């Protein structure tokens, strides 16, 4: 019996050793010792998200130019409780620069300050801090502008039709999606034929988004357009309209995740506003390297948006920006 | 390369059969050896990054919330129960404390102390409700605390209106949140004090012995004259109180109520307690084991990132360690019944 116990303990230890050993191999694989090559650590907001996949592609593209290596460590959920332990472990490895999408504008400040006091440079990508002064640069998307783009596209698609327009938003207090609505509402004002019904919150639930849309269609038979600020909302809106077999409502969605692209191909969504995470990544990578090599750094960069429709979906200009884990060939 | 070193390492530390050692470690001897092995491996692979005091203190900081909650869960599991509500109660307590502190200030010592008190009270209240539902309404602990897991999270979001609160007195951030005493962060000091006090109560007091007795055989404990219902309610209230403490610690540490950041804390806590040798069937367990069981995932999360593996490997390795720990527990159980 004792034998069995110890062999089990030993087996567990062995497993760990081999795991850790192979990790060490891949960790030290490249980058060390070369002059001009830097160790870049990238910490996205959450794992398994195609948006951050594209950000990582951009950073890698920028790093390649100088022969630097990029180590990507993503938290399981979009939350400071998962992100901070990862950040601290990354700090202990002493990379030259940390590129991070902070999951909380306040909670990440103290741990990032720890990094800068140890001489590690910090670049913020996509999201930012309440007090971004410790960062070398912040790169983000202009969501107000993207909202205006969405409004312009919807007005164009409706081509002079009149009626009501609804916005399905995520949840109160999310700055990115709130900005999208702000820009959209502003863009819509110019066209008095379209009546803005304002926004409804789905709280990131497909079911809620779907019920919001079906009840709005019932209450406002003149509904002609829907602006959805996030992928889940678009799925809900599409489901609600599909159930009603309603073809009078034009949807303009947000984000070009793989399902979002399919919605365009199937004609369920007329257009998707696509941010440029790839450009965010490239800019963040470039500014990080500028900061390390002592070149001038642009403190604040914002990247724009493109609109994907069925017509331009296959054009290289749009293809480049569809969110994906597979990086486009440089 | 390190393989030979570690396999000889494991047996070296353990076949100690001294009475004192067994009282202290109980069933946690194997798992303590595993933790030491893990530390040695990471230390050997990258001593410059892993074995610095700053890094080890960070590991402790990241484990401190779980240590506090796991101390409470040790009592619950030893008493033969289970508590799935801890992470939600943490969030709920933080939100209520946050609202009270905003109403009172939002800065200053008075608001800070009121916040701590309210957080503890809110947590203890949820715990007491859990205990009453389990003992008086006879709802099984798994279901009762699964219910309060959802209810506390939902209520927290209603009160906070879905937005994280971020107004917290600077006094609280500067002390409990990021402050240090003699180089040790307050978060770690509080967590270790809780573990120490909890361990003392569990091992040496009548309250602790009654908890073991109820977990071993509830009916026998009842017939021996223990007021089982009252004791169980107090155990759940204690677990809730400690979740409340973790709630104010979390708020002070992150400067935000982190509404969505604690949804899997309950499983992490139960895994930690069980890895530490506490039996899911009650009656067996030590606070030392729980401490070690909490540190293993924390060390893995840190070390795997440092050696360059994706942090997802932590989930995998913690899963394996959990099963191995329970397997060892089963072996011990079988060998004891044979004798």
Image (tube, coloured by chain):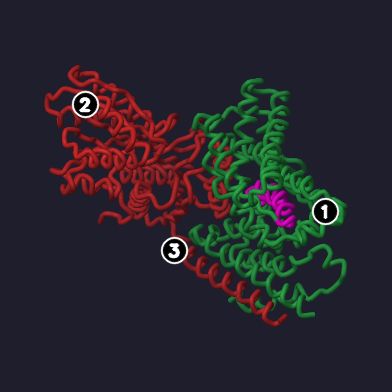
Chain colours: A red, B green
Q: Which residue matches tag 2? A: A221
- Residue at position x 49%, y 50% in the image: A75
- Residue at position x 20%, y 25% in the image: A222
Secondary structure beneath label 1: helix
Answer with left or right where residue A277 lies relative to residue B74: left
Viewer can see residue A62: no
Structural crowding at the residue carrying mark 1, measured as other residues with C-alpha within 10 Å and reported as few (<14), some (14–19) or many (≥20): some
Q: Which residue matches tag 3? A: A30
Label 1 and label 2: CA atoms lie apart by: 67 Å
Q: Does the magenta stretch include residue B25?
A: no
Same chain for marks 3 and 1?
A: no
Tag nearer the camera, 1 or 2: 2
Q: Is residue B73 magenta?
A: yes
Secondary structure beneath label 3: loop
Q: Which of A60 and A208 is in front in this view?
A: A208
Tag nearer the camera, 3 or 1: 1
Q: Which of B195 and A30 is in front in this view?
A: B195
Up-down relation of residue B251 to residue A263 (above or below)? above
Q: Nearer the viewer, residue B132 or A322?
A: B132
**x, y percent for residue B257:** 57, 35
Q: Quadrant of residue A326?
A: bottom left
């Amino acid at each position: 019996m004792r034998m069995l116990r110890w062999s089990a303990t030993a087996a567990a230890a062995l497993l760990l050793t081999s795991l850790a050993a192979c990790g060490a191999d891949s960790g030290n694989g490249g980058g060390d010792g070369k002059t001009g090559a830097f160790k870049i650590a990238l910490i996205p907001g959450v794992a398994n998200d195609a948006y951050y996949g594209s950000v990582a592609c951009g950073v890698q593209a920028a790093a390649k130019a100088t022969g630097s290596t990029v180590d990507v460590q993503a938290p399981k959920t979009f939350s400071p409780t998962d992100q901070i332990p990862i950040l601290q472990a990354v700090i202990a490895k002493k990379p030259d620069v940390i590129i991070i999408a902070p999951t909380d504008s306040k909670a990440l400040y103290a741990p990032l300050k720890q990094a800068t006091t140890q001489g590690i440079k910090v670049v913020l990508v996509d999201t930012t801090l309440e007090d971004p002064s410790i960062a070398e640069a912040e790169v983000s998307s202009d969501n107000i502008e993207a909202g205006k783009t969405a409004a312009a596209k919807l007005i164009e698609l409706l081509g002079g039709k009149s009626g009501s327009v609804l916005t399905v938003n995520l949840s109160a207090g999310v700055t990115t999606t709130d900005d999208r609505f702000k820009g959209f509402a502003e863009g819509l004002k110019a066209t008095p034929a379209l009546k803005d019904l304002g926004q409804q919150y789905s709280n990131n639930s497909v079911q809620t988004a779907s019920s919001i849309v079906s009840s709005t269609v019932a209450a406002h038979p003149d509904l002609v357009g829907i602006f959805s600020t996030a992928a889940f909302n678009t799925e809900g809106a599409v489901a609600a309209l599909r159930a009603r077999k309603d073809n009078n409502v034009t949807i303009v969605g947000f984000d070009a995740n793989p399902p979002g692209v399919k919605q365009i191909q199937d004609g369920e969504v007329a257009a998707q506003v696509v941010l440029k995470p790839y450009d965010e990544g490239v800019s963040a990578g470039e500014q990080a390297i500028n900061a390390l090599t002592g070149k001038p750094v642009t403190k604040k960069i914002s990247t724009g948006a493109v609109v994907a429709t069925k017509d331009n979906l296959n054009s290289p200009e749009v293809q480049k920006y569809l969110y994906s884990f597979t990086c486009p060939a440089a | 390369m390190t393989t030979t070193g570690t396999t000889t390492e494991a047996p070296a530390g353990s076949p100690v059969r001294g009475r004192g050692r067994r009282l202290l470690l109980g069933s946690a001897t194997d798992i303590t050896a595993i933790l030491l092995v893990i530390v040695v491996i990471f230390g050997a692979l990258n001593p410059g990054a892993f074995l610095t005091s700053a890094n080890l203190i960070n590991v402790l900081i990241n484990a401190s919330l779980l240590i506090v909650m796991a101390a409470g869960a040790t009592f619950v599991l030893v008493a033969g129960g289970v508590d799935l509500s801890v992470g939600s109660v943490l969030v709920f307590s933080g939100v209520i404390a946050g609202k009270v502190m905003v109403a009172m200030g939002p800065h200053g010592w008075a608001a800070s102390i009121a916040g701590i008190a309210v957080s503890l009270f809110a947590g203890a209240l949820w715990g007491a409700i859990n205990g009453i539902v389990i003992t008086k309404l006879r709802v099984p602990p798994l279901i009762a605390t699964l219910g309060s897991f959802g209810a506390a999270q939902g209520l927290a979001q209603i009160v906070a209106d879905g937005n994280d609160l971020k107004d917290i007195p600077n006094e609280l951030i500067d002390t409990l949140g990021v402050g240090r005493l003699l180089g040790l962060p307050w978060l770690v000091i509080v967590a270790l004090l809780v573990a120490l006090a909890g361990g003392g109560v569990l091992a040496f007091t009548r309250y602790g012995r009654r908890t073991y007795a109820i977990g071993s055989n509830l009916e026998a404990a009842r017939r021996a004259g223990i007021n089982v219902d009252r004791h169980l309610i107090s155990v759940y209230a204690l677990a809730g109180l400690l979740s409340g403490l973790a709630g104010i610690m979390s708020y002070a540490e992150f400067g935000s109520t982190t509404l969505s950041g604690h949804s899997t804390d309950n499983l992490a806590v139960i895994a930690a307690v069980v890895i530490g040798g506490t039996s899911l069937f009650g009656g067996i367990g030590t606070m030392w084991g729980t401490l070690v069981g909490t540190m293993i995932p924390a060390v893995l999360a840190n070390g795997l990132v440092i050696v360059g593996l994706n942090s997802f490997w932590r989930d995998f390795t913690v899963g394996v360690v959990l099963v191995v720990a329970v397997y060892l527990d089963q072996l011990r159980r079988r060998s004891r019944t044979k004798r």
